[in-house]
Every structure is written in C-alpha cells, then in structure tokens.
Image (spheres, rainbow, N blue to C red):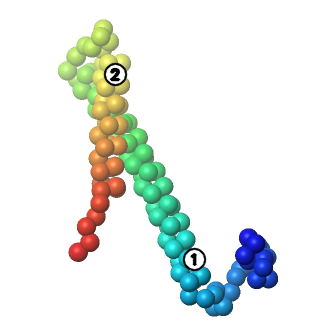
Amino acid sequence: MLGLEAKGISKFQIPNYSTCIPSELAVIQEEVKMVYRIISIFLRILAMLLVGVVFAVVGFILGANLFIALGLELFGARGYESGGPIGFLLGALIGLIGSGVLLFRRRTRK
C-alpha cells in the first residue's frame, strides 16, 4: 500500500493503468493470472467433491437395492443396512478418482 500512497493513490481509488510503466503493468497482469489460476483450482476441487457426493448417493441406492434384490447378507445385516454403506463408499471412491483424473490431468497443447 505504501507504493500506491506514495503515488497519491488511496486504497479506495482505482488506479489509472494508462500511467503505469510497462514493467508495472506486466506485474499486474501476472498477479491477475495467478488469481485466475487459484480460483480455477478451487472450482475444480469443488466440482470434484460434488461429483464424489453424487456418485456416493447413486452407489448407496444401487448397493442397497442390489443387496435387497439378491437377498444377500453381510455381517448379519440384510438389505440396505449392509449394501448401502458399501455402495456409498465405492461410489464415492469412483466419483472422486474419476473426476480428479478428468479435472486435474495435464492437457497437452496442440
């Protein structure tokens, strides 16, 4: 802030970039790119978590219905009590791993 105040710009004024020297403008552009990258990574993480939750719910429903339909028993529990948590965990793992690979893989430029 001291640099801006020394130039007569308060922290509540929008600086006039037309008076910036090219090196200052390059620094500002790099800062904007860095903020954009941080926001992009944050949004990717949120999307990955959302996909994981959706897959977990779908896995819970499918796992519970599968155990009910087949009449399977696991650790003395039947139906959704045994198949639901297994489907939930498998769905969450598949969703998180799959979306993480799709969202964070390195993209090659053509």
Give the residue at x 30% y 10%. Answer: 75
| Left or right position of 10 against 100 | right
Give the residue at x 36% y 18%. Answer: 81
Q: Residue 2 at x, y = what percent?
A: 76, 72
Number of marks present in the image shown: 2
Q: Secondary structure at mark 1?
A: helix
Q: Tell me whether circle 1 and circle 2 mark residues in contact (CB < 8 Å).
A: no
| Left or right position of 47 against 86 | right
Disc 1: CA contacts within 10 A as few (<14), some (14-19) or many (>=20): some
* Tag of residue 48: none
Q: Secondary structure at mark 2?
A: helix
Q: Residue furthest bottom?
A: 18
Mark 1 or mark 2: whose residue is earlier in sequence = 1
The quadrant in which the C terminus is found is: bottom left
Q: Is residue 58 visible?
A: no
Placement of 55 over or under 16, stated as above or below: above
Q: Residue furthest left?
A: 70
Name the residue carrying label 1.
Answer: 28
